[in-house]
Amino acid sequence: MAFGDHDELLRAACFSALDRLRSRFGDELPKQNGLDAGFAFDGARVPFLNWQKGIFRAARQTGPAALSVMTSASSPYEADGVSEDDGYWYAYRKGESGRRDNDALRAAHLLQTPLVYFLSVAPGYFEALYPMYVEDDDPHAQRVHLAPGAIRLGEAVPLVDGNVARVFARLFRLAGDAREQSWPLAARHLPKVRAGEFNEALMELGALVCTPRNPRCGACPLQAACDGKDAPEQFPERKVRAARPLLAWDAYALLRKDGAVLLEQRKGEKLFGGLWELPRAKPPGVRLQGPLEKSGVVEQTLTHREVRVTVHSARASGEAREGFRWVVPEGLVKLGLSSLTRKTLRAAQVRLTSRAP
Ligand code: SF4
């Protein structure tokens, strides 16, 4: 059995076991007497996830791609769980010890294999989102973007990673963004049978023969058809990264005597739409009970822009009108908060915790 077949069966067993757990418990799956039992596959129990590390590739798998990722309520990773454009950012694991896990995450992107995203919704409870796909890999920002999709097990799909894009860029002397132009080329050249092996062969050619420096054109099976073999290192062309526009605003951390903080739900705009964040102006109905003081400046790089938020804090009281909500610290983890909002809350010394004090 090829690793693709074996791992597809294992993933199918995982999804079907989660279907059964959801029909028993609903959307919030308990760790205890639920997820911690794992699922049955090929006569053995396989864990759904790794409770410590977040990124999980099961020992029973033969392929390289992660089976699941998890964000706990106390995740130290800023990029985790940021809901944006119908998906979630998920941070690479930090440090040398996380390299193998990050490779598994990136393999899920390259191979476009479906995985499960376990999202902590309360202490000991997780929502299982599946099938999710790693639709974007951003090594520069050390994170991937997860998006929901349909099961595509066994489907013949083209695959373009950096190695494949380099091969196509040289074969066809592509000017401009090689990765973008390689997708239609990969689709056009994809054979109807053994598509997976074709994809793997192209990736290997890029990794072992058509290397970034000193490609071995003399040993390349595509040499006769290659337009770029006379000057391979000129391809792919270097990208000039466009400057990201800066968005800047003030945010107000208004804190009630009982520790609750006032949040506002962003209207249905694309950036942060639907998410809860600190208000950008003092809302009507709320009275300041002390001086407004600057707490800090929070900066974050998003895919297409830089964001800078100046955070001000003050004691306050009053009613939360429509679109606003007073939230106690233990309620914050249950809301859809972007990492930017979590940073602004921390700048205002607001505790983010899943437990009551
Ligand atoms: S001939 Fe050289 S440049 Fe062209 S694909 Fe092969 S290794 Fe790459």
Image (spheres, rainbow, N blue to C red):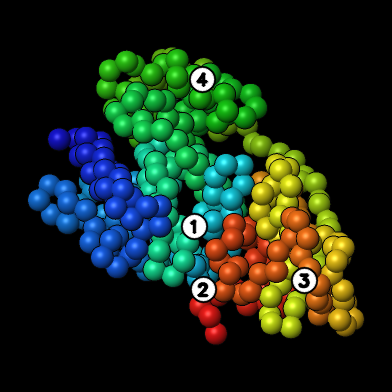
Measured from the top left, where is residue 171 in percent x and y? 49, 21
Within 8 Å: ligand 1 and the Cβ of disc 3? no
**Residue closest to the eye, 295 or 25:** 25
- Where is the N terminus found, in terms of image quarters? top left
Q: Which residue is the site of mark 4?
A: 184
Q: Amino acid at mark 2?
A: Ser
Answer with mark 1 or mark 4, whichever residue precedes in sequence: 1
Answer with mark 3 or mark 2, whichever residue precedes in sequence: 3
- Circle 1 SS class: loop
- Circle 4 SS class: helix
Measured from the top left, where is residue 82 in percent x and y? 59, 54
Measured from the top left, where is residue 279 in percent x and y? 79, 62
- Where is the C terminus found, in terms of image quarters? bottom right
**Residue closest to the eye, 177 or 288:** 288
Is residue 218 positioned above or below 34 on the image?
Answer: above
Mark 4 to mark 2: distance in Å? Answer: 46 Å
**Mark 4 or mark 2, whichever is nearer to me:** 2
Q: Which residue is the site of mark 2?
A: 354
Residue 327 found in image quarter = bottom right
Q: Amino acid at mark 4?
A: Pro
Mark 1 to mark 2: distance in Å? Answer: 23 Å
Is residue 284 positioned above or below 200 on the image?
Answer: below
Q: Which residue is the site of mark 1?
A: 92
Q: Amino acid at mark 1?
A: Tyr
Q: Which residue is the site of mark 3?
A: 253
Identify which residue is drawn at 43% across, 42% down. 132
- Crowding at mark 1 (Cα within 10 Å: few <14, some 14-19, many 20+): many
Mark 1 to mark 3: distance in Å? Answer: 30 Å
